[in-house]
């Protein structure tokens, strides 16, 4: 599970780096993005990532809860 | 479910603030004017708006210049499209100020203003005009002064990046909260010598470091836009970097000792020592030097960004939401490490 | 308590005297660093550079000196010291000893530094403030690094870990110190500069208190 979390962190940081490198472009870039509607794609990707992150947390939470119940029975 | 309400709440807060924070438009503003200088006589200027609706609100459109006590209205005004209009002004020979502020008002955008939009060119600037040379006010009282829809302030330099406030600041706040947890668990470890507290302290620090990375990344992007560089030498920024170094050192220390109880004690002692020293640094150092960063050196945190009610409405829930997510991740890590310890104990027994 | 602190302090002093070459190595380190700086720069007339270089050399010398303070205390010796004194007394004695060692080293290093790299920056200096800067600086470096050294001594990679653990902790202190000493070199009045002296003193006292509280937990391991 820790391995999963680690992978997730790496993904998260990679995502931050892509976004920041894209934003580092010169001016005029934002006009292109807005006028062509490409900004909506960026928006969708960001929202999806956060949704996936929360979904992943929910999945982990349930799995850990299940393991905790089993642990209690074993005791 | 009853015990997990805060997780649901923080997930919802994060999602709603994310969507609104990224999607709500900026308030209408004036992006640029040309030419930028006004001379005596007739001047034709083009005004480019940002997020404005000049065409939609054309019927009650008003444009005026303000200079000292004077208001100057155009005698010719035409709207090209939603984002562009042309105005022709007749500028008098004497003015009270070297700069003219530009105002545009219509029922859709409310009042939009650009401070010091134009500079005078070869005009006579006097302290105050005599009564008989002042223009009578030509401006009708506007029916609408604010745009109807929900929006964020449109500030020069910041522009669209003002939204980063909802991500950058909560990341640091969450990091501080988690480091506070880490400190508390370290103190508890030293008092009770229970390995569970040591695991909790290092888990909290791990998650805190991830949020610090998020804070650094979002801050770096923001600095590139507003200050022009990915990193500027600034007490607040250097303090943040040092804080990250401290916690990296904490992990190096813990991993360099084989005996886990010894590692726990060393880590706890270093955690407390370093935390106090860092706090001292954060309190003392910014007063030594000037800082660009808001919230440092008598530079109040938000007034610069005009944290208006709309911003607050998104900012505070975002802080609570991200803090909740941070604590949730920390709790998950705590529980997994507790399970791991239980498993090891069972295998040895 | 005072008796115990004195005993630890004197014990360190005596054991240092018996291993003069070991203490000498720290002094040699300072001399060699200053000499390298001399060969590289010849003369530095610029006050901030002169000041910064001096404190950087002192910082690394302090790391070297502090790293040795617990290096000898392992196994049987530690046990012996444990019977001799309370842990609070041990750490306070060690801190005092380190502060004294650094005091001598910083003053000697300063003299040598001024001798080789030129006294141009000293012309407008306020002598009292400068002495205060050297004294407070060596005191603080010695006090703060003692606890870090105690932490690092429990690991295999003593000196390397010392730098990793110590630098982020000492950096705030060092920045205040450099500012204070630069102002002293520029001859700024006490009304401006006094606040930095106060901050340096406060950090030293705080690190003293923290070590007093935290060291007993380390000692048990």
Image (cartoon, rainbow, N blue to C red):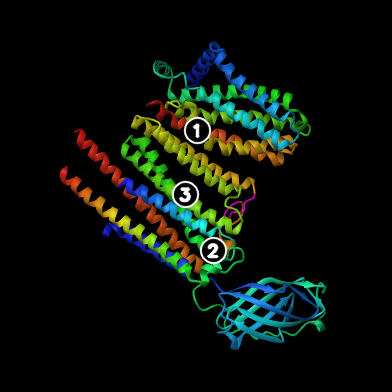
Q: Does the magenta stretch include residue B291?
A: yes
State whether residue B73 is above or below residue C24: below
**Number of the label disc, if any, that sits on residue B162:** 2
x%, y% of residue C155?
42, 27
Magenta: predominant secondary structure element? loop
Per the model, the C-alpha gap separating discs 2 and 3 is 20 Å
Locate residue C183 relative to residue C98 in the image: left or right: right
Locate residue C183 relative to residue B328 in the image: left or right: right
**Number of the label disc, if any, that sits on residue C209:** 1
Q: Which chain carries label 2?
A: B
**Number of the label disc, if any, that sits on residue A51:** none
State whether residue B236 is above or below residue B253: below
- To which residue does mark 3 refer? B212
Q: Is residue B135 magenta?
A: no
State whether residue C22 is above or below residue B228: above
Q: Mark 3 lies on which chain?
A: B
Identify which residue, A21 or C168, lies in the foreground.
A21
Asked which secondary structure carries label 1, the reply is helix
Question: In the image, are marks 2 and 1 on the same chain?
Answer: no
The residue positioned farthest toward the bottom in the image shown = B59
Q: Residues within 10 Å of mark 3 (few under 14, many from 20)?
A: many
Tell me how many marks there are.
Answer: 3
Asked which secondary structure carries label 2, the reply is helix
State whether residue B261 is above or below residue C29: below
Locate residue C187 relative to residue B106 in the image: left or right: right
Region rendered in magenta: B290-296
x%, y% of residue C60?
58, 29
């Amino acid at each position: 599970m820790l391995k999963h979390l680690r992978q997730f962190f790496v993904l998260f940081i990679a995502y931050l780096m892509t976004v920041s490198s894209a934003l580092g472009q010169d001016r005029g870039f934002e006009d292109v993005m807005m006028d062509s509607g490409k900004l909506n794609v960026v928006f969708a990707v960001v929202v999806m990532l956060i949704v996936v992150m929360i979904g992943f947390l929910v999945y982990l939470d349930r799995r850990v809860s299940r393991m905790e119940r089993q642990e209690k029975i074993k005791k | 479910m009853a015990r997990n309400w805060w997780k649901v709440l923080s997930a919802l807060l994060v999602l709603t603030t994310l969507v609104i924070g990224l999607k709500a438009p900026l308030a209408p503003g004036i992006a640029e004017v040309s030419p930028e200088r006004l001379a005596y006589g007739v001047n034709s200027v083009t005004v480019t708006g940002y997020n404005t609706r000049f065409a939609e609100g054309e019927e009650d459109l008003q444009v005026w210049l303000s200079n000292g006590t004077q208001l100057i209205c155009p005698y010719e005004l035409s709207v090209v499209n939603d984002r562009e209009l042309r105005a022709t002004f007749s500028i008098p020979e004497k003015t009270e100020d070297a700069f003219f502020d530009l105002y545009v008002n219509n029922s859709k955008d409310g009042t939009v203003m650009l401070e010091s939009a134009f500079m005078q060119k070869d005009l006579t600037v006097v302290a105050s005009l005599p009564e008989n040379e002042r223009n009578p006010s030509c401006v009708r009282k506007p029916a609408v002064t604010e745009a109807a829809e929900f929006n964020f302030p449109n500030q020069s330099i910041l522009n669209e990046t003002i939204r980063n406030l909802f991500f950058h600041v909560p990341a640091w706040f969450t990091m501080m909260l988690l480091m506070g947890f880490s400190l508390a668990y370290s103190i508890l470890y030293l008092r009770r010598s229970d390995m569970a507290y040591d695991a909790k302290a290092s888990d909290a620090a791990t998650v805190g470091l991830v949020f610090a990375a998020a804070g650094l990344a979002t801050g770096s992007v923001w600095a590139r836009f507003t200050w022009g560089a990915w990193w500027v030498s600034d007490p607040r920024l250097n303090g943040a970097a040092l804080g990250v170094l401290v916690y990296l050192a904490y992990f190096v220390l813990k991993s360099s000792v084989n005996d886990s109880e010894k590692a726990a004690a060393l880590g706890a002692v270093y955690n407390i020592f370093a935390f106090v020293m860092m706090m001292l640094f954060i309190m003392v150092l910014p007063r030594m030097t000037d800082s660009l960063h808001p919230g440092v050196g008598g530079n109040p945190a938000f007034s610069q960004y005009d944290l208006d009610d709309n911003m607050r409405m998104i900012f505070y829930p975002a802080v609570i939401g991200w803090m909740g997510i941070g604590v949730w991740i920390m709790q998950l890590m705590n529980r997994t490490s507790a399970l791991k310890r239980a498993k090891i104990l069972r295998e040895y027994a | 308590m005072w008796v115990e602190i004195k005993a630890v302090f004197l014990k360190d002093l005596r054991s240092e005297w018996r291993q003069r070459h070991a203490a000498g190595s720290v002094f040699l380190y300072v001399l060699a660093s200053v000499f390298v700086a001399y060969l590289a720069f010849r003369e530095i007339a610029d006050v901030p550079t002169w000041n910064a270089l001096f404190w950087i050399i002192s910082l690394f010398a302090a790391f070297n000196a502090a790293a040795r303070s617990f290096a000898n205390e392992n196994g049987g010796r530690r046990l012996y010291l444990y019977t001799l004194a309370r842990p609070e007394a041990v750490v306070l004695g060690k801190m005092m000893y380190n502060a004294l060692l650094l005091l001598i080293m910083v003053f000697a290093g300063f003299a040598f530094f001024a001798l080789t790299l030129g006294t141009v920056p000293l012309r407008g200096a306020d002598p009292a403030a400068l002495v205060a800067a050297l004294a407070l600086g060596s005191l603080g470096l010695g006090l703060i690094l003692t606890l870090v050294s105690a932490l690092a001594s429990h690991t295999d990679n003593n000196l390397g870990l010392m730098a990793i653990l110590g630098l982020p902790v000492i950096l705030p202190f060092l920045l205040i110190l450099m500012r204070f000493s630069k102002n002293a070199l520029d001859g700024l009045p006490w009304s401006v500069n006094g606040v930095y002296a106060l901050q340096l003193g406060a950090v030293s006292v705080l690190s003293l208190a923290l070590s007093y509280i935290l060291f007993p937990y380390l000692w048990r391991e």
